[in-house]
Image: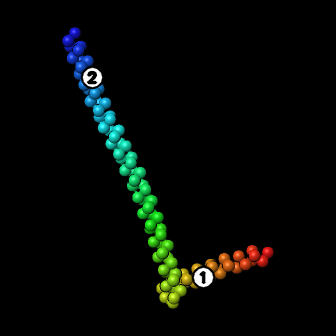
Amino acid sequence: MSELVEIVDSLENKISKLLHKIELLNKAKERLEQEVTDLKTEDETIRNTILEWEERYNSLKLANSMLGSDTNKTEAKLKINTLIRELDYCIAQLAE
C-alpha cells in the first residue's frame, strides 16, 4: 500500500511541475506575442517613413530637373507631358 502512495505522490509532483512549466510557457508566449505586435507596428512605421522619404526624393529629383539639371531632363519632360494630358482631359470633361 505504501508503494501505491509513493507512486501517487510522485505523479502529483510530476503533474505539479508540468503545470508550472505550462504556466511559464504561456507567460513567455504572451510576452513574445506582444513583442511581435510591437515589432509589426514599428515595421509599419518605418515603411511609412521610407515611403515618405522616397516621395521627397522624387520631388527633389523632379525639381532639380525642372531647374535645368541635365541628369533628369527626360524624366521631367515625361512628367510634364503627363500633367498636360491630365489637364487636357479635365478641360475636355468641363467642355462637355
Q: Is 81 left or right of 89, judged from the image as shown?
A: left
Residue drawn at x 29%, y 34% is 21
Residue drawn at x 63%, y 79% is 83
Q: Is 8 above or below relative to 60?
A: above
State the CA–CA distance, disc 2 to disc 1.
Answer: 80 Å
Percent coordinates x, y for residue 6 in the rendering: 21, 17
Residue sticking out furthest to the right? 96
Rate crowding at label 1 as few (under 14), some (14 to 19) or many (20 or more) other CA atoms within 10 Å. some
**Judging from the image, what secondary structure is the residue with disc 2 in?**
helix
Residue drawn at x 44%, y 67% is 50
The residue identified by callout 2 is 12
Q: Is 56 above or below relative to 14?
A: below
Q: Is 80 above or below relative to 14?
A: below
Q: Is 32 left or right of 52, judged from the image as shown?
A: left
The residue identified by callout 1 is 80
Percent coordinates x, y for residue 41 in the rendering: 43, 56
Splitting the image into 4 quarters, where does residue 89 fall? bottom right
Figure colour scheme: rainbow
Residue sticking out furthest to the top? 1
- CB atoms at circles 2 and 1 under 8 Å apart? no
In the rendered structure, which amino acid carries the disc numbered 2? Glu
User: Which label sits in the foreground, 2 or 1?
Assistant: 2
